[in-house]
Image (tube, rainbow, N blue to C red):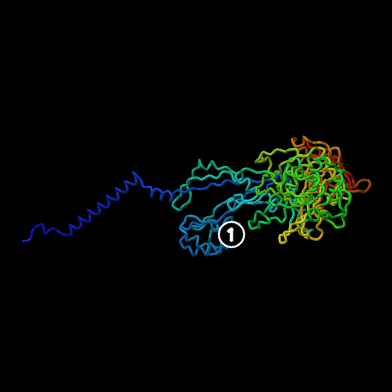
Amino acid sequence: MTSPKSTKDPTKNRLTSLLTICLLFVAAILTKAAYIQLIGNDRLEKLARRQFQSKMLIRPRRGVITDRNGEPLAINVETRSLAVSPNKIQNKRTMARLISKATELPYQRILEKLIEKREFAWIKRHVSDSEFERYKKWQITTKNGEAADGILIVKESKRIYPHHELAAHILGSVNVDSEGVEGIELLNNEKLQGKIVSIQAEKDAFGRPTFIDATAANHVRDGEQVTLTIDASLQFSVEQELRNAVLRTNARAGSVIVMNAVTGEILALANTPSFDPNLRHASASRRRNRVITDGYEPGSTQKTLLLAAGLQHGFKLSDKVWGEKGSFIIQGKRISEAESHEKFEWLTLKKVLQVSSNIGAAKLAIKLGTDRYYSVLKTFGFGAKTSIDFPGEISGYLPPKKKWKPLSLANIGFGQGILVTPLQMARAYAAIANGGWLVRPKLVMDSESKTNEQPKRILTPKTRQLLVEALLSVTEEGGTGLKAKVEGYKIAGKTATAQVIDPKSKKYSRSRYIASFIGFPVGVEPNIVIFTALDQPKGVYYASETAAPLFKAVLTAAANRFSMPATMAVDRKLAEKDDSSVISDKLKWSLAKVTTSEQNRALNWVGKDKNGSITWQMPPLVGLSVREAIKKMQGHMFDIEISGIGFVKTQEPESGKPIAEGDIVRLTLSEE
């Protein structure tokens, strides 16, 4: 007989067991959920933060760079960049083909980025408007410019150099993230880029930022403006004249510096070949700032500093040395003049500089001796950086004094065996131009030296006076710098045609030279010094025929820009006086800022005078710079006489009066 317990339904037992298991499972889930909610789980919290929170970098606008008059040289524009969110793209191969056709980038390279498991990847930065239109054609974006799923159009700020090659070697450039990599952009990167802030942002289900930390965003600070010492108008003229000279002489390269001898401010600095900083593919040889980063053997411009050393130690311009009739042997080596026909006999020290005698300079160096000559060269700053506010400056090379043998002493006397930068040479001549003070060159207005170097007097008033006298003879009859002369000015300067070391033979080449001229107009303001150099000119290579004419062209441009009246007579007393207070004084001249005038229009025709000449109505010129005044009068045969410095204070004839072609227009300038 069957027991009642054995007749119990087995199905009911299985259901009971299943229900028990389910209840236990639910209890476990609830327990886990309660644990997570009440106690928490680090791993899950990190996953949640990664999914719904992100950090964003808020980049400020980069500061602009301007010239001394406020002309923008480096600015920012808003542009667009193409990026992708690979995790949100479904058909990756199809999208890769579309992006490849739209951007003209390799398909495989794009596909590799799309198959990566990441939220963001750049495809192409700084897309042009014309290229953005192609994106619509290939359905990367809609006709309204909205991006397809997984495609991101990111607005960015792009660095632009509106004048292209103008001052490129000074400005330098930035990378794709607008970070300075060369030049002033690199040196002042921290100041220009402002303060970048990282902030927390909440994302929606599609990964788009919805809420950001506004308090943190307020700490973003735009970059500061940097004002250069250069004058953009003069810089343009200098670059143009340098390019013309390089083409005319078929030179390998060239450089020009225009420097305010009193303040050390660089008013123009040019190198050729040059480059456009808007393009990032220029070679290193085109990008480097040769006048600061490259050294050369100065040649005969060094003779001026040798003469300075001699005058500082009691020699006189009238002292004589024997020229050896063109050939001089020392330590078994022959020193000769630049030209075989130059067979000088007795030469005064002034004549040594005027005719640029190598033998005369060698003999003076030997008479002066190593200790005294070396000391003066160190005083001029050779073998040390000038502390200019620009990256990459080199020190040059002044051989240790213990290595100076009679032959090396003689060679350094006429500019061989020493390595200098063009900037060092320009600064040395500036000390002669400004009254004997060694100043620190600078490219940024109101910049401070890292060493807090102050101007120091390195030449006595008497030495400076005699050096100017000797340098003036170089551009007078019988000198080597005749073609540097500008009518109406007295030019003190020196030519140099320096041999270049042949990289193969390691000896001085007989076919490669660096032709240079350094000088300054005497007794005029602004007190500027100009360095010009042409590297390996072909054909007629002498500095007297290459670098000297370039100096003339640059000085003419500077005279026009800074309103130096071409008829201004030189007061010799002014040129020779001890102007020891000039360094501490503020500039006493106008640098002729370009202003706009509402009345900048053509002359009004009046009729004819009693002689039958066509007459015009005199325009208002008071308050304008000389350049603006001449521009108003251009196109007519007027004789314009200018006196003074600065802006037009009075005019004759007065505004509104009739004037005929051939009449005289007298303009009086004032600094006020």
- Tell me what residue is drawn at x 22 percent, y 54 percent: 19
Q: Position of residue 325 (x, y in %)?
A: 87, 54
- Tell me what residue is drawn at x 59 percent, y 56 percent: 127
In-image side of 345 versus 3 (left or right): right
> Quarter holding the C terminus?
top right
Q: Is residue 565 visible?
A: yes
Q: Position of residue 624 (x, y in %)?
A: 78, 41
Q: Secondary structure at mark 1?
A: helix
In-image side of 29 versus 410 (left or right): left
In-image side of 9 versus 180 (left or right): left
Amino acid found under the numbered disc labelled 1: Glu
Which residue does the numbered mark 1 point to in the structure image?
133
In the current view of this chain or complex, which residue is farthest to the right? 611
In-image side of 220 versus 640 (left or right): left
> Quarter holding the N terminus?
bottom left
Q: Position of residue 578 (x, y in %)?
A: 81, 36
Crowdedness near tag 1: few (<14), some (14–19) or many (≥20) residues, C-alpha within 10 Å? some
Q: Position of residue 306 (x, y in %)?
A: 79, 46
